[in-house]
Each structure stands twice: as C-alpha cells, then as structure tokens.
Amino acid sequence: MDDKVNPTKRFFLNLKDTIKQWFYNDEPINNNLSLDELLKSFIVIIPIHGNLYLCHYYLNFGISYFLYFNPIDFVYVFYSNNIKLLTFSILIGFLFIQLVLNFKTTQLLKIKPNILLSGLFLFTVLLSYLLTTKLTDFYILLISSFLLFGVAIMQKQSRITYYALIFLYFAYTIKLAYLEAAIVKKNKPNFTIVLNDKTYALQQDTTINHKDYFIGRVTDYIFVYNDSIKSVRVVPISEVKEIQFH
C-alpha cells in the first residue's frame, strides 16, 4: 500500500479488506467456518431469538419484557418455536434422502449436495409452518421470499451466506411474534387461575365476548389482559395456588 496514503484512509482500507476477506470468499463453508464457530454462533442465536420474540410479542400488549427479563425464557422460546420445525425436518429429511438414493441416474448424482440441502430446507420450513401455524397469504409469501433468497445465495457457500440466512431468520422471528400475538388477541385463551389468597387472577368465562384472557407467561410471571380497560395484570408465579381447566 502506498505510504503516502492518509493514515485514517489506510485504516479504513485495511478494515474493508479484513471484513471482505472474513465474510466472503470462494472456499467451501465447511473450510471457512469451524465447528467451534458454528457452536458459538448457535449459543448467540438462542438469546437473540428469544429476546426478539419476547420483546415484540409482549410489545403488542403494551408490556416491556425487559422489566421481567430472565435468560431461561430464551431457551424455552427457542425450543417451543423451533421444535416443530426440527421434528418435521428430521422426518421429511429421512424420506427425502431415501428418495434421492433410489435414483441412480448420473445426472442426479451430479447435483451439488448444497443444492439438495437447500431444496430440503425450503420444502421443510414451508410445510412445517403451513401444517402447524395459521399463516395468511402475506406471511406465506414472506417466508417463501426469505427462503428462496437463501437458496439462491447458498450457491456461494461463504460466511456472508451463513450470516445472511441468520439475519433472515431473525426477521422472521419478529414477524412470528406479531402473528402469534394477533392469534392470541383473536382467540382470547381463558381458564381459571386461583391465587394463594383464594382470589382469582383469571376466571374462566365461556361467553364469546369475555374480556379477560391469558397472554402468556415467563419464568416468574403470568400476564392477564383485560380487554375492556386495555390493561395488563402481572401475577407473580409465587402467588399462584392452582390453575384450573374446565
């Protein structure tokens, strides 16, 4: 590099080269990302996913999740939001692999493994959420767009591909939070929660237009929404004596 280049400019040029080299090259992703890096990324993804989902979900009801923060919530949310996807991925994955192995044509065997995996990923995610979640056409289109973009850029198996897919996953996490909040507002889940002092935090109401309903719970608190006055009652788990389902 020319010594006459301004030190500040040299710094940013070096930074640009470093970022470009680190994020993107033509080496296979398995050579570019070590198992250690993948595990570290996974550890980071869990709290970010949980934080994004919980903050945006409870924001729909005027609740600041940060007031009730507990890291255990992140693990539960990550598990509950992804266990269906994981289950379908495993089941469909075995079927998909068996179908591929049954074809002996040379042309099929020339298909790159990453293309097969990309197609499996796209098919599995769409089928899983269509079977387990009430999605509008808008959200189906949104998911399809994200996944098709992911499949397209996976032809270059690089770090930037890896992190682009993670970013898209987080974007969908936020959309999922708003979608499920809308479902709760529509269905208004309702049952009986009895407190230690024998009063009710929530009392089951079988009428169609009942006003009180269950929003959700975190590690230490339960949230009950009153639709008539648009307010949330926060009940500590330690004060709950029993929960009754009729």
Image: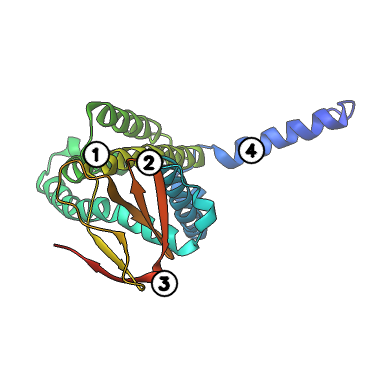
Q: Is residue 60 above or below residue 30?
A: above
Q: Assign a secondary structure to mark 2.
A: loop
Q: Which amino acid, by three-letter code, is at mark 3?
A: Ser
Q: Which amino acid, by three-letter code, is at mark 2?
A: Ile
The N terminus - image quarter: top right
Q: Position of residue 237 (x, y in %)?
A: 39, 68
Q: Position of residue 118 (x, y in %)?
A: 30, 40
Q: CA distance from mark 3 to mark 4?
A: 49 Å
Residue at image x 45%, y 55%?
A: 46
Q: Which residue is mark 3?
A: 238
Q: Nearer the viewer, mark 3 or mark 4?
A: 3
Which one is earlier in the sequence, the residue at label 1 or at label 3? 1
Residue at image x 54%, y 55%?
A: 67
Q: Position of residue 84 (x, y in %)?
A: 24, 53
Which one is earlier in the sequence, the residue at label 2 or at label 1? 1
Colour scheme of this structure image? rainbow
Q: Assign a secondary structure to mark 4.
A: helix
Q: Which residue is mark 2?
A: 229
Graded by Cα atoms within 10 Å as few (under 14), some (14 to 19) or many (20 or more), the crowding at tag 1 reads few
Q: Assign a secondary structure to mark 3.
A: helix
Question: Is 174 placed left or right of 100 in the picture?
Answer: right
